[in-house]
Amino acid sequence: MTENVTRATTTGATAGTTTAGATAGAADEAAVEATAARSYTVVADVNVRSGPSTSYAKVGRLSAGSQVTIGCQTPGQLIVGPTGTSRIWDRIGAGRYVSDTYVRTGSDGYVAPRC
């Protein structure tokens, strides 16, 4: 007998449900994002990418002064940006990444769990 448990999860401004067993990875991902729910300021206009590199598709653009919530962070392409040089990329949504060098986090290192 397989147990199906549905749990509500909230990430940023969106909510969803996760079915235990079938999507354990998604549940873990939601838990990581929920722990890091804090808003940070974008310091210069920046392209949003589908992955942690400029070789990934552009999926949006953020203007300086925008607020973002970093769900998790991952190493990626080395970027020289307005706040320095870093390989850290911030996941700001599903399939949405920006270089940490464009976000004022107050740190040169990781401020959220790794993706």
Image: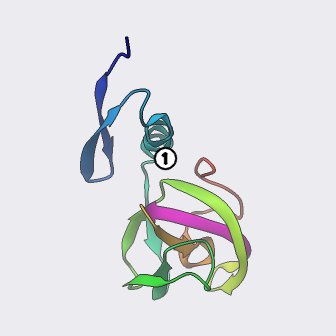
Vertical placement of residue 82 versus 107, above or below: below
Asked whether, in this view, residue 101 is left or right of residue 6, the answer is: right
Q: Identify the residue at horizontal 25%, vertical 52% (top origin).
A: 14
Q: Residue furthest bottom?
A: 45
The foreground one among 1 and 6 is 1
The foreground one among 82 and 51 is 51
The foreground one among 91 and 65 is 91
Q: Identify the residue at horizontal 37%, vertical 69% (top origin).
A: 67
> Residue 69: x, y in percent?
42, 59
> Residue 11: x, y in percent?
34, 47
Residue 90: in magenta span: yes
Identify the secondary structure beneath mark 1.
loop
Magenta stretch in the rendered image: 86-93
| The image quarter in which residue 2 lies | top left
Q: Residue furthest front?
A: 1
Q: What residue type is disc 1 on? A: Ala
| The image quarter in which residue 101 lies | bottom right
Query: How many C-alpha atoms fall within 10 Å of the one at disc 1: few (<14), some, or many (≥20)?
Result: some
Asked whether, in this view, residue 44 is left or right of residue 60, the answer is: right
Q: Residue furthest top?
A: 1
Task: Please give the residue where the numbered disc 1 appears in the rendered image.
Answer: 36
Vertical placement of residue 63 versus 36, above or below: below
Residue 28: in magenta span: no
> Residue 81: x, y in percent?
65, 85
Vertical placement of residue 59 versus 69, above or below: below
The foreground one among 41 and 48 is 48
Q: Quadrant of the N terminus?
A: top left
**Total count of labels:** 1
Prevalent SS, magenta region: strand
Asked whether, in this view, residue 109 is left or right of residue 39, the answer is: right
> Residue 3: x, y in percent?
35, 16
Asked whether, in this view, residue 4 is left or right of residue 39, the answer is: left
